[in-house]
Amino acid sequence: MVQPIKVSQNYFVSPQIEIEDIKQLADAGFTKIICNRPNEEIPSELHSDFMAIAAKEARISFDILPLTHQSMTPENILKQAELIDAAYGPVLAYCASGTRCTVIWALGQSGKISADDIIQTALKAGYNIEGLRQALN
């Protein structure tokens, strides 16, 4: 199974997951998976539609919000935060490495907690987002 990386209390990130990871994530207590990876980046067998079917079978919520540098918009930042807030338990978001999932979480925290705290939280999870400091202030 993929090893989720804890970013905050109920938010975890990971690189690309496999279909067989979904049931294991549900069994581990995750209540929602967010796919932040565009289908254009991955083999067809890992496209979000197939992942959503596996999630339905595993009885875990599955949301699709593909992100690129161009689609890291205020609307998508808000949507990701809403998806996280609507979950009733731990959330796993995945992309290629977990970086995009961490960046969108960080941007969603802007104005709620200090830029220093956001950056340190991400760094503890293994993601250096110092380059976002100006956007987080």
Image (tube, rainbow, N blue to C red):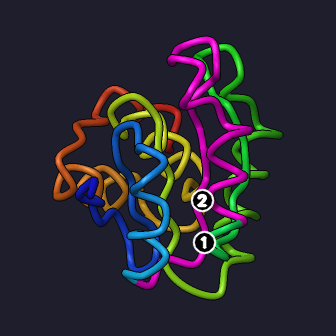
Please tell me in which quadrant of the rendered image residue 65 appears: top right
Residue pictured at 48% horizontal, 43% vertical: 101
Q: Position of residue 10 (x, y in %)?
A: 45, 77
Instruction: Give the camera-side residue of 95 and 17.
Output: 17
Q: Is 31 contained in the magenta span? A: yes
Badge 1 element: helix
| Magenta segment | 29-56
Please tell me in which quadrant of the rendered image residue 6 appears: bottom left
- Mark 2 vs mark 1, foreground winner is 1
Q: Position of residue 72 (x, y in %)?
A: 66, 28
Circle 1: residue type: Ala
Circle 2: residue type: Gly
Q: In the image, is 16 to the left or to the right of 54?
A: left
Mark 1: few/some/many CA within 10 Å (<14, 14-19, 20+): some
The label on residue 99 is none
Please tell me in which quadrant of the rendered image residue 85 appears: bottom right
Residue pictured at 40% horizontal, 37% vertical: 16
Instruction: Please tell me whether residue 92 is drawn above or below residue 74 in the rendered image.
Output: below
| Figure quadrant of the N terminus | bottom left
Instruction: Give the camera-side residue of 98 and 20.
Output: 20
Instruction: Please tell me whether residue 39 is drawn above or below residue 6 in the rendered image.
Output: above
Q: Position of residue 70 (x, y in %)?
A: 68, 14
Instruction: Give the camera-side residue of 94 and 137.
Output: 94
Q: CA distance from mark 2 to mark 1?
A: 36 Å
Residue pictured at 47% horizontal, 68% vertical: 23
Residue pictured at 17% horizontal, 47% vertical: 126
Q: Which residue is mark 1?
A: 58
Q: Earlier in the sequence, mark 2 or mark 1?
A: 1
Badge 2 element: loop
Q: In the image, is 95 to the left or to the right of 111?
A: left
Q: In the image, is 6 to the left or to the right of 132?
A: left
Q: Which residue is mark 2?
A: 111
